Image (spheres, rainbow, N blue to C red):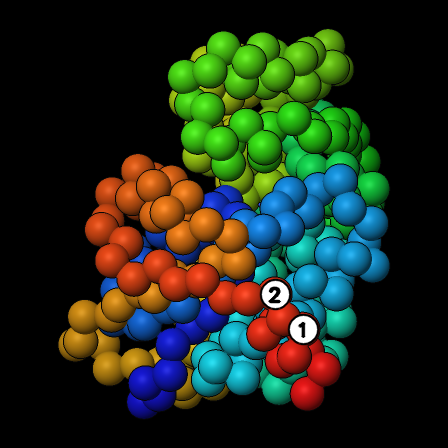
């Protein structure tokens, strides 16, 4: 038994979609969630910069005593997963691979669309993960720079959101894809808009449930689970405005976010330099 919490991080509120699945799968574990609100969005940034941010956050969480780190951000997973695994002594789990697998299983016409940030699209990681499973699959990738800022601003009912989604969906519809990977952890926060734009004939793939299972299996295999009979808790940290994460988090998780604390970027940098 291991009472240490699991650390989860994202550029902002998107990782809450993965945290939610973790809470469903592991209600007995404690979690510390860190959103890098001050430096969100990550999508337009070069891979090296995203890697530095991810290393800072993960080092901070490791110093704070977490037993496993979940990179609940596709951009950070694409840019930094191997570097995180090399640098840290606790296990690190990312997103991305489970979605590639689920998309290959779901598609019938082997035409798969990807909506993701510029950083994730530029990394080419989804195409290689899909091709490793089915070399004959066609992957159509679309970078969506407009979505994360609108989602972080809480723009659910803003007509600009539906317009932006329609614009990004158009090339995928034209390519005749039957499966679309939501390759950014923010996108399930606007799932109803995406479902209306793509309709019933397209399967939307977001595999946070499988990611949560991978976290649970890793804890079990390493013998570091918490007592299954207890009720876990969550602590929330942000480098941005605590009120902003609280508002988005409470709306999405339908959970009171009583403890949202601010972490200074200098503290993250110090942890990485130690
Ligand atoms: N939610 C993140 C991702 O999955 C980051 C998006 C961003 O900050 O641009 O890619």
Q: For the residue labelled by badge 1, is the local secondary structure a helix, a strand or a loop?
A: helix
The part of the image, by quadrant, that contains residue 1 is bottom left
Q: Residues within 10 Å of mark 2 (few under 14, many from 20)?
A: some
Residue assigned mark 2: 265
Q: Residues within 10 Å of mark 1 (few under 14, many from 20)?
A: some
**65 relative position to 112: left or right:** left
Q: Toward the viewer: 112 or 1?
A: 1
- Contact, CB < 8 Å: mark 2 with mark 1? yes
Q: For the residue labelled by badge 2, is the local secondary structure a helix, a strand or a loop?
A: helix
Q: What percent of the width, then of the height, locates residue 80?
A: 73, 63
Residue assigned mark 1: 269
Residue 92 visible somewhere in the drawing = no
**14 relative position to 46: left or right:** left
Q: Residue at x 55, y 66 (%)?
A: 264
Q: Residue at x 67, y 73 (%)?
A: 269
Up the image or down, 141 lies above or below 37; here it is above
Q: What percent of the width, then of the height, locates residue 160?
A: 55, 13
**44 relative position to 60: left or right:** right
> Could you tell me which quadrant the C terminus lies in?
bottom right
Residue 230 visible somewhere in the drawing = yes
Q: Residue at x 61, y 65 (%)?
A: 265
Q: What percent of the width, then of the height, locates residue 63?
A: 54, 84
Question: In this figure, what is the number of numbered marks?
Answer: 2
């Amino acid at each position: 038994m291991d009472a240490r919490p699991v650390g989860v991080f994202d550029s902002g509120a998107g990782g809450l979609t993965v945290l939610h699945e973790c809470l469903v799968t592991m209600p007995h574990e404690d979690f510390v969630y860190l959103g890098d609100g001050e430096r969100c969005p990550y999508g337009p940034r070069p891979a090296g910069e995203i890697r530095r941010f991810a290393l800072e956050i993960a080092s901070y969480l490791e110093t704070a005593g977490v037993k496993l780190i979940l990179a609940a951000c596709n951009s950070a997973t694409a840019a930094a997963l191997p570097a995180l695994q090399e640098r840290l002594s606790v296990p690190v789990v990312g997103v991305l691979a489970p979605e590639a697998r689920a998309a290959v299983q779901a598609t019938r016409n082997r035409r798969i669309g990807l909506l993701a940030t510029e950083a994730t699209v530029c990394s080419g990681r989804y195409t290689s993960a899909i091709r490793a499973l089915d070399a004959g699959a066609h992957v159509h990738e679309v970078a969506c720079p407009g979505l994360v800022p609108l989602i972080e601003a809480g723009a659910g009912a803003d007509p600009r959101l539906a317009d932006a989604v329609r614009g990004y969906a158009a090339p995928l519809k034209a390519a005749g894809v039957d499966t679309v990977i939501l390759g950014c952890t923010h996108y399930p926060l606007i799932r109803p808009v995406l479902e209306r734009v793509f309709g019933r004939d397209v399967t939307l793939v977001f595999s946070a449930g499988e990611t949560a299972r991978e976290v649970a299996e890793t804890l079990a295999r390493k013998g570091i689970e918490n007592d299954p009979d207890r009720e876990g808790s969550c602590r929330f940290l942000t480098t941005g405005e605590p009120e902003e994460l609280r508002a988005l988090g409470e709306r999405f998780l339908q959970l009171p976010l009583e403890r949202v604390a601010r972490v200074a970027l200098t503290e993250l940098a110090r942890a990485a330099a130690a």
